[in-house]
Image (spheres, rainbow, N blue to C red):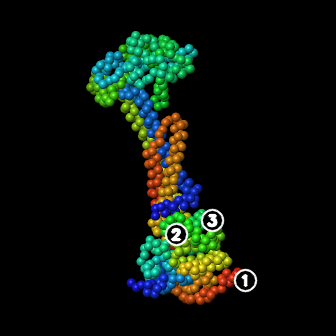
Amino acid sequence: MSEPASRSGALIELTGITKTYGKGDAAFKALRGVDLSIWRGEFVAIMGPSGSGKSTLMNLLGCLDQPTSGGYGYEGIRVETLDPDQRSLLRRHAFGFIFQGFNLLARTSALENVELPLIYRGVPRKERHALAAEALAAVGLPDKLRNTPAELSGGQQQRVAIARAIVTSPVTLFADEPTGNLDTRTTVEIMDLLTRLNERDGITILLVTHEDDVAEYAGRVVVVKDGLIETDRNNREARQRPNSWAANREKLDS
Amino acid sequence: MIWNAFLIALREIRRNPVRAFLTVLGIIIGVAAVITMVTLGEAATRVVRSQISQLGSNLINVRPGMGFGPRSASAGVPSFTVGDVEAISSQIGGLVAVAPVSSTNLSTIYRQNARNTGIVGTTSDYFQINNWRIQEGRFFTDEDARIGNAVCVIGQTVVTNLFGTEDPIGRTIRIGKAACEVVGVLASKGQAGMGDQDDTIVVPITTLQRRLVGKTSTRNINLITLSAEEGSNSDALIAEIVSLMRQRRNLQANEDDNFNVFDTRQIAESLSASTQTMTALLASVAGVSLLVGGIGIMNIMLVSVTERTREIGVRLAIGARAREVLLQFLVEAMTLSSIGGGLGVLLALVLCAALANAIQMPYTFEVEINLVAFLFSTGVGVIFGFAPARRAARLDPIVALRHE
């Protein structure tokens, strides 16, 4: 078996990935042969209309699902050969996830929510508290440790979710429409936070969105259509984007 | 990993304490019911045993009639004679004492107080055989019995009813046709179970026949009571007595016994066997409620899995393995049912104390049944928690995350 990941030095190497749902006449090909390489430290936005296959692609990248055929190398690991438990362990140790719906545990404090992945890692209690508090401080919520999701705004909830995703210092952060439920102003805050995590902490970010404004934050934009990659462009402007808060302030005012 | 699962489970239970309490209510009640039933059942058995042991140890009674109960054909069956008593006393070895008993009901009068009381006519050995102790005064003597002195020994109930607070010793009460001097008061044996044993007047058998009843017949002994030596084989002894009595009553080989012989051990065994059967019955009914409690847990855990599908999705996404999700829900069910079991043990403690107090019965804390009921409740958690936990563990992370 070839080892494209190690040869090219890419963090993620997809080759000829297909995903078919259902069987026979009812079969639906969500992905029809996707090749994609993502390097460490990249900030990639995956775009596309609904039904384009972008969510399927995201799930495969995040090891939540298995491809029907094709190869997936992650740091040289042949992901397509892993069983569900091994994929769980890969997610536990290398991935962080944030979702459109935040998916925080209800009636559970922000601190306890953020501690959750550390519990599965078997981090001792004291260290767990310290790391979770640190992560919450990093997302700008140092004073909300005891608040439950119901006591937090949408933007704050998503910050808690981001803290939960980064508390394990993941290599790769998967963000599935993270601003889909947020207003423009909060969207800007969250995107600034993600940008900082990418630029300062070097976390590789894969972000699914259908909003152009959000995609503009990424250094690379991949557009999926009908189960194939339509375009894959570098977003050079993102590098010298103006102070985004000021730039978006204009949009808000207009 | 188990400790982690336990932590997560405790956190889940703390997140919704009211629901957790309602979920385990069935277990609490089931455990408490089982423990209470068994504890009180054991206590009742002990009470019955101690009452029987108060009747006298190694006590053997010989009565005319066939068998027990309403169908026993005692009418027309001849009573025993003094000769029968003497024959048993002289021909059967291994006996400590033998006493004839002739009992009847007579009116007793002291001043303005009158009532009917069971009168026992016997010899002085009766007191020893039946474990009676004197509280005040003395028993009547062999001399009293031989001469037929008008003396009597009375029980506590008779004292209360006839004399009230007055000291009965030396007073004279009228029994049937004659007056009798009270020479002794018996120590109380208590009531309940066997009827009021203290409602009795004991007089010499000669006195009863000659003075109180006023007729003399040789066949007037309706009970021969005797005590065997400590450690003697009561079955062999009973067989000997049976064969002697058959001979004395001229029974042919094809005739049934027209008397019966039984010892206190037999009564003790049959009575405690029946209380134990009752206890087992009640405990199994209570056990069913424990099972129903388990179904309640399964029900809530299934609801919980559905309700928390997205949460399970999140857990899977952040790296929980299927077996960890399974363990989490299993431990959660187990923790819930153990908490229920623990609370049930506490509730049983209160219930036992309250009920035992209400019916005036001493009881002891039965470690074994508490332990068994508690472990059983934990087991119920495992058994009924397994199906919901497996359902949770089999969820597909993507489907779970999309669940509304």
**What is the x, y in percent for residue B35?**
48, 45
Q: Is residue B15 above or below residue B374?
A: below
Q: Position of residue B76 (x, y in %)?
A: 38, 21
* Label 2 environment density (alpha carbons within 10 Å; few <14, some 14–19, many ≥20): many
Chain of the residue displaying label 1: A
Pointer 3 or 1: first along the chain = 3
For the point 48% across and 50% down, the residue is: B290
Count of marks overlaid on the render: 3
- Residue A179 versus residue A124: which sits nearer the camera? A124
Crowd around label 3: few <14 · some 14–19 · many ≥20 (10 Å)? some
Q: Earlier in the sequence, mark 2 or mark 3?
A: 2
Q: Which mark is residue A117?
A: 2
In whole angstroms, how far apart are the C-alphas of marks 2 and 3? 19 Å
Mark before the other along the chain sequence, 1 or 2: 2
Q: Which numbered disc, 1 or 2, marks the residue closer to the eye?
A: 2
State the residue at coordinates (40%, 27%).
B56
The kind of residue on which mark 2 rests is: Pro
Task: Tell me the residue at 50%/57% (across/down).
Answer: B335
Secondary structure state at the residue bearing disc 3: loop
Circle 3 residue: A147
